[in-house]
Image (cartoon, helix red, strand yellow):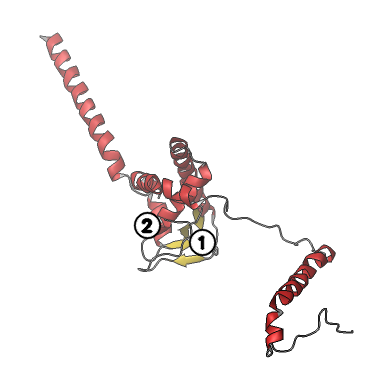
Amino acid sequence: MIRAYLTDPSPLATSELMQVSGAKMGRRLLAIAAVPLALGGCITVEAPTEPIVIELNVNIRQEVIYRLAEDAGNTIEENADIF
Amino acid sequence: MGEIMTRSIIRTALGAAAIATALGGIAAPAFAQRDPAYAAARAAGQVGEKMDGYLGIVGVETAELRRVVNDINIKRRAVYAERAQANNATLEEYALTAGCQAILATTPGEKYQAPDGTWQTRTSAAPLRDSRCP
């Protein structure tokens, strides 16, 4: 297998000239970051053998729970036989 | 004379019934206690509070435990449905909130379900709960 670098490894930014070229570096990094996105279409995902079980409704928002908390607490106290 | 006696007896009986009803109506919720089978299973750690607001079987399932748990959960669901409607919330929202509170209300030694799904034994420390719990 041949290992090929997408970009040349940059030397340490010791000189002033190299430090100024930061913006250029940023563009290069963006290009590298885009590569996995492009390759993403090639990845095959195998279906799990066991069914996926979603235990709880993740869509329930915290503010709803906070709004209901007091009432739920009273309900538990008033129905002590089943809690 | 006989008629007056009869009327008096009826009045007394009705009065007693009214008092009993009144007392019963006040006393029932305050003295409502867990069914002995449920209380025993809970104390023994055979059943625990799940995150979703319902009771679960912790260890090996038996027909008796399933009966106890189903009985409690059916009753809980009915209460949740009524309260959810009164609060303009969904059954699941209300049940999850009640689950937060029920886990918080467990006493040391009782079982509850942690956010990762594992059964935990309640200690004197705060229980491990869903991050959305108040």
Q: Which residue is mark 1?
A: B58
- In this orientation, does residue A42 appear? yes
Q: Is residue B125 left or right of residue B114?
A: left
C-alpha separation, residue under disc 1 versus residue under disc 2? 18 Å
Q: Is residue B120 above or below residue B56?
A: below
- Residue B55 x/y as whole percent: 48, 53
Q: Amino acid at mark 1?
A: Val
User: What kind of residue is marked 2?
Assistant: Ala
Q: Earlier in the sequence, mark 1 or mark 2?
A: 1
Image x and y of residue A55, in percent = 59, 55
Residue B92 position in % (x across, y down): 53, 46
Whether residue B67 sits left or right of residue B105 in the image: it is right
Figure quadrant of the N terminus of chain A: bottom right
Answer left or right for B60 relative to A15: left
In the image, taking residue A51 as reference, residue A73 lies left or right, namely left
User: Does residue B73 appear in this view?
Assistant: no
